[in-house]
Amino acid sequence: MSDKQSSNAYWQANLRIIWICLAIWALVSYGFGIILRPLLSGIKIGGTDLGFWFAQQGSILVFIVLIFFYAARMNKLDREHGVDE
Amino acid sequence: MDQFTLNLIFIGLSFAVYIGIAIWARAGSTAEFYAANRGVSPVMNGMATAADWMSAASFISMAGLIAFTGYDNSTYLMGWTGGYVLLALLLAPYLRKFGKFTVPEFIGDRFYSKTARIIGVICLLIISITYVIGQMTGVGVTFSRYLEVSNSTGLWIGAAMVFMYSVLGGMKGITYTQVAQYVVLIIAYTIPAIFIALQLTGHVLPQTGLFGTLNEGGGKFLATLDQVVVDLGFKTYTGHHKSTLDMVLFTLALMIGTAGLPHVIIRFFTVPKVSDARKSAGWALVFIALLYTVAPAVGSMSRFNLTSTMWPGAETGDTYSQPAVTLDSIENDDDKQWMRNWQVTGLLNWEDKNGDGLIQYYNDAVTEGPSAEMAAEQGLQGNELTTVNNDIMVLANPEIANLPGWVIAIVAAGGLAAALSTAAGLLLAISGAVSHDLIKGAINPGISEKGELMAARISMAASILVATILGLNPPGFAAQTVALAFGLAASSIFPVLMMGIFSKRINKEGAIAGMLAGILSTLLYIFTYKGWFFISGTNMLEDVAANWVFGISPASFGVIGALINFIVAYVVSNATEEPPVEVVELVESIRVPRGSGGAVAH
């Protein structure tokens, strides 16, 4: 393991990425899919509104993008801090 | 060739492949048995995880749940997929770095306590056993429907199948079998959906067909569906009718329940590197999404097809422009053969209550609006499509759309693949907990690797036997306990793993108190409404929304249980001694990916 300083910085950077991803995760599902649906009801798609799309398909697609985004950012971070395998 | 022969050929062929794989991938060591020697590529592991995770409930029941409730049941779609984000970000990479075989083992090591490990084993066993009973029941039903054998014969055939490939192959055999099962399952789910999307909206992709325009009538599909169901006295399909708070909590409960399910977590122990564990969760979700984004299309389109079968005028969106379907047509026409097939199973039924020779389907609980006017005009004495089981929506789909016999056969093989793959994954989690955590971890630590492998195989065989016997005589609570399994996973396993990784301060007293508080509060809340140990009549409050504390349904309570777990663990940990230095070092080491290869030995 690298020295304490570096591993602390690595962990803090990791936590920051996790927080950002979790905020998006909550926004598209609980937010756009459920709570904020009335706000989005003006945006019509295919016989219904955007909130319905987020609840039934959109949030799942965003989840996939989020995981791969996280994996890519973490690989970069691992290399920067010299803790990759 | 008749339908039965086709079913036999497709089911037989798929089983030959599974057995062939099991023989090819026979496990020789505990590392191979529990973790497939950690040599599974992230894409393969993602596919296996998808098959492992998607049970009979996803394959058979979910589209039906969405079909009859519409938007409100989007909770299942978001909840059962959103848990993978939590797994990828919060658990999988760190547990892979930890490098052991089972979930209780992590709990025991991180919280330096045999008691914590045993509590982990108990949670795991309750979660996995309740789940596996449901799968075995599903296997029995599917076999009896398609192979025309009795329910119990079907169950024994299923048990023999699982025994052959899981006891022989362990994790290695199961992983590759599950990859094959995923392929069967996804083809079976998608083909009928594509045909039906083409028939209704002209879209090849069911995902976009859902938002497309109807071939007949030219209205938007979802808008027409809303119109048609409202005409019949049902609630709008795309509207929001349930409590927002409970929808949010239920979705969250499914998400953290998913992330806490032990048989899903152990799949991430099988990949070579920490970075592969992160990616693998993404691949799992890609493969799950292939089914989960099709499911809402299957649900809404089969609801539409069912309605327009009953009311031919509904096809253009003008429900009452033509009379209801005639009894004569249902009993004699070729295109209604599926209705007669499903009547035999008792899952679909009708009755001409007013003797007018027509079968009118509507919501007879509604006393105002178009459906009530229609009922008064036509002298109806209640809804005449008396039984429509949610579960027939997926299985009857190809028959409703008059698809060729081989499509029906492949759906049968797909349903079996879904149930069998999940059963095998659960049995592996159970046998790992018994042989590795109970026998090697607590009862006989000096056991040789060969002895442990034998113990793993024997405990797996024993759990298959127990699951089969329970599947033959399912306890009354089997269906209800799925909610309990999720609630338990959410309130016990997920929080303790998360705290183990993200906090250095949580100690063994905190973890044990937290797990107990989480599980017991969740059990107490569920039993209050569902009866003690699900014995009907012993519930202290009626299970209706008015009685729920703050409107939280028993199925959603796992979230509150998890919260209680976190709070109790935090408070108790701060009131007691800090964890020892070597445990703090363990936490630091699992936080960095480097060096995971060396941590394999145990």
Image: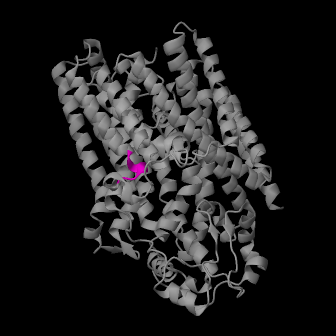
Rendering colour mode:
one colour
> As rendered, which of B105 and A83 lies closer to the eye?
B105
Locate residue B533, reporting x and y percent: 52, 40
Above or below, B125 relative to B234 = above
Magenta-drawn segment:
B552-557
Quadrant for residue B244, please give it: bottom left
Q: Name the quarter where the C terminus of chain A is drawn.
A: top left
Q: Residue furthest top?
A: B446
| B397 is higher (above) or lower (below) than B524 | below
Q: Residue at x 35, y 62 (%)?
A: B243
* In magenta segment, residue B553: yes
Residue A81 location, quadrant: top left
Q: Where B556 falls versus B360 (above or below)?
A: above
**B338 lies left or right of B293:** right
Tell me: B354 left or right of B583: right
Residue B64 visible? The answer is yes
Q: Where is B269 relative to B264, above or below? A: above
- Residue B86 lies, in percent from the top left, at 35, 41
Residue B339 falls left or right of residue A64: right
**Image coords of residue A1 (percent x, y):** 26, 18
Viewer-proximal residue among B303 and A84: B303
Q: Residue at x 46, y 85 (%)?
A: B368
Q: In the image, what residue occupies the spot 33% across and 68% down?
A: A50
Does any portion of residue B281 appear in the rendered image?
no
Residue B416 pos. (x, y %) = 66, 48
Tally the marks: 0
In the displayed structure, does residue B55 sit left or right of residue B341? Answer: left
Residue B425 falls in image quadrant: top right
The answer to whether residue B176 is magenta is no
In this rendered view, identify the residue nearer to me: B414 or A73: B414
